[in-house]
Image (cartoon, rainbow, N blue to C red):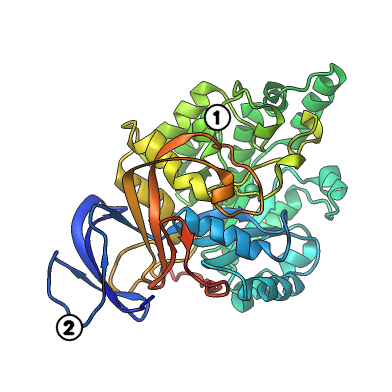
């Protein structure tokens, strides 16, 4: 492993270009020069070959969950999983009722010696103390994005051990975020009051299929909540990010609203691109939001294509398969996902003519980097950026086997799927962390990303 090298023969892909022959000179962990192919460099500079490969800026998974698997060692296992999937940065969510000062200290202690790739945190805000301390979290810990669960209102929140919030709380939170500047409030959009009623009815009727799970959370409960979040945000001048968007109804609302208020960003997840409510996988497919209709799946692809969706992220939850193998209403929600994001987008998107490479790069690099204050260090191949590089073999076919990818979890939604287009080398700040499926990096190499509010 050498920090200084020249990457030769690759086709560079970024949010602006589907491919350009480019050599890249890396010095001190940063991109030092973009060179015409074959341009001479200082004698003795090691060469890394990227012949036949596409070179993406290091991929960013802006939505992973820490704390659901093995709380301490998951910083190792889940960053291995990320590197196996070509990801050089992960942003992880925490949900706590306690003061984040202690959470930050504890999690950093776990992560610092274990992470293989760079990482940052999102804090979920759930009580009055969190709003009071928001500016401290921004200034001391470099956290510039905060999650708010619109579905954890009142009773539902208290059931989860949180204080239980209401619209007044949401109003104050957005006001404070707007006051602090370029802070993103990540809004889980779901009208839980409607969902709870429908769920009780379905349960009373003994219904318990994956399709019933979906029926308990109709599209309206997502879109109505999105509209409220956007209306609040516009009124208060706050910037919001809607994670895991899943329905055409909600996406159409976002398109309309963005014409009047631009500070609304949208993410979807790979599973909303590949699975629907008729997918025959039982409780294994339980997620929130649920799998939707085939038309919603099509709508997500359209949103990726036309730019109304800004980010694809995994919503990675590294639990064991056993937690899914329960009756539907008791099964755990979510799945592991980081390592398969790129192969899914390449196989189902690029190779099927649904999505160009530049769009894929935008969704996995520049999009999340800009939204989450990681640029200009992350998310591009510009001179001066961190030398985070993901080398991809577009033609490589590989059958997904979760056990080869390194997560604490022991399954993948895509187990047995033959996907085409895989990362073959993951380089973080000039150091190769993964090569041909083997981990060659070191735990503890990954750095914490303290983010700053962009002056805009
Ligand atoms: Zn999530």
Q: Position of residue 304 (x, y in %)?
A: 41, 39
Residue 146 visible from this viewpoint: yes
| Residue at image location 72% in from the left, 54% down from the top | 68
| Residue at image location 63% in from the left, 64% down from the top | 75
Compared with residue 55, is residue 302 higher up or lower down, i.e. above or below?
above
Q: Is residue 394 left or right of residue 302?
A: left
Q: Secondary structure at mark 1?
A: loop
Compared with residue 73, is residue 13 higher up or lower down, i.e. above or below?
above
| Residue at image location 87% in from the left, 20% down from the top | 204
Image quadrant of residue 216? top right
Q: Position of residue 367 (x, y in %)?
A: 42, 54
Compared with residue 121, is residue 222 higher up or lower down, i.e. above or below?
above
Badge 2 is on which residue?
43
Q: Alpha-carbon neighbours of circle 1 within 10 Å: few (<14), some, or many (≥20)?
A: some
Q: Position of residue 197 (x, y in %)?
A: 81, 27
Compared with residue 293, is residue 72 higher up or lower down, i.e. above or below?
below
Q: Is residue 396 left or right of residue 374?
A: left
Q: Secondary structure at mark 2?
A: loop
Q: Earlier in the sequence, mark 2 or mark 1?
A: 2
Residue 370 visible from this viewpoint: no
Image quadrant of residue 46? bottom left
Badge 1 is on which residue?
275
Image quadrant of residue 353? top left
Q: Residue furthest top?
A: 205
Q: Is residue 231 left or right of residue 383?
A: right
Q: Position of residue 303 (x, y in %)?
A: 42, 36
Q: Alpha-carbon neighbours of circle 2 within 10 Å: few (<14), some, or many (≥20)?
A: few
Q: Quadrant of the C terminus?
A: bottom left
Q: Quadrant of the N terminus?
A: bottom left
> Which one is in front in this view, the residue at disc 2 or the one at disc 1?
2
């Amino acid at each position: 492993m050498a920090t200084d090298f020249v990457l030769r023969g690759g086709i560079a892909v970024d949010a602006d270009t589907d491919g350009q022959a480019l050599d890249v000179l890396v010095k001190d962990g940063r991109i030092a020069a973009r060179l015409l192919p074959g341009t001479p460099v200082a004698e003795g500079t090691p060469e890394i070959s990227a012949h036949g490969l596409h070179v993406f800026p290091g991929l960013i998974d802006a939505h992973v969950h820490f704390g659901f698997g093995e709380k301490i060692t998951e910083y190792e296992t889940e960053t291995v999983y990320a590197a196996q999937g070509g990801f050089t940065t992960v942003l992880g969510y925490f949900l706590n009722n306690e003061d984040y000062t202690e959470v930050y200290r504890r999690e950093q202690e776990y992560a610092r010696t274990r992470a293989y790739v760079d990482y940052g945190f999102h804090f979920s805000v759930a009580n009055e103390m969190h709003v009071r301390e928001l500016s401290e979290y921004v200034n001391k810990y470099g956290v510039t994005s905060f999650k708010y669960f619109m579905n954890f209102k009142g009773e539902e929140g208290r059931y989860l051990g949180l204080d239980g919030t209401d619209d007044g709380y949401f109003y104050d939170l957005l006001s404070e975020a707007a006051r602090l500047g370029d802070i993103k409030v990540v809004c889980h959009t779901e009208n839980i009051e409607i969902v709870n009623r429908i769920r009780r009815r379905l349960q009373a009727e003994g219904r318990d299929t994956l399709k019933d799970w979906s029926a308990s959370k109709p599209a309206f409960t997502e879109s109505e909540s999105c509209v409220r979040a956007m209306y609040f945000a516009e009124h208060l001048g706050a910037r919001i990010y809607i994670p895991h968007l899943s329905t055409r109804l909600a996406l159409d609302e976002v398109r309309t609203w963005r014409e009047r208020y631009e500070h609304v960003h949208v993410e979807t997840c790979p599973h909303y691109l590949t699975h629907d409510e008729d997918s025959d996988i039982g409780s294994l497919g339980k997620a929130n939001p649920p799998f939707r209709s085939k038309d919603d799946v099509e709508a997500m692809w359209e949103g990726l294509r036309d730019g109304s969706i800004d980010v694809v992220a995994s919503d990675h939850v590294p639990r064991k398969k056993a937690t899914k193998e329960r009756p539907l209403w008791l099964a755990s929600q979510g799945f592991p996902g980081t390592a398969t994001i790129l192969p899914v987008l390449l196989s189902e998107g690029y190779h099927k003519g649904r999505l160009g490479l530049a769009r894929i790069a935008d969704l996995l690099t520049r999009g999340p980097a800009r939204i989450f204050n990681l640029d200009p260090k992350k998310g591009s191949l510009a001179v001066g950026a961190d030398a985070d590089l993901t080398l991809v073999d577009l033609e490589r076919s590989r059958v997904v086997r979760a056990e080869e990818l390194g997560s604490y979890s022991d399954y993948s939604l895509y187990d047995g799927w033959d996907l085409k287009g895989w990362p073959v080398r993951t380089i973080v700040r000039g150091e190769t962390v993964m090569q041909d499926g083997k981990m060659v990096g070191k735990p503890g190499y990954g750095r914490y990303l303290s983010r700053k509010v962009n002056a805009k």
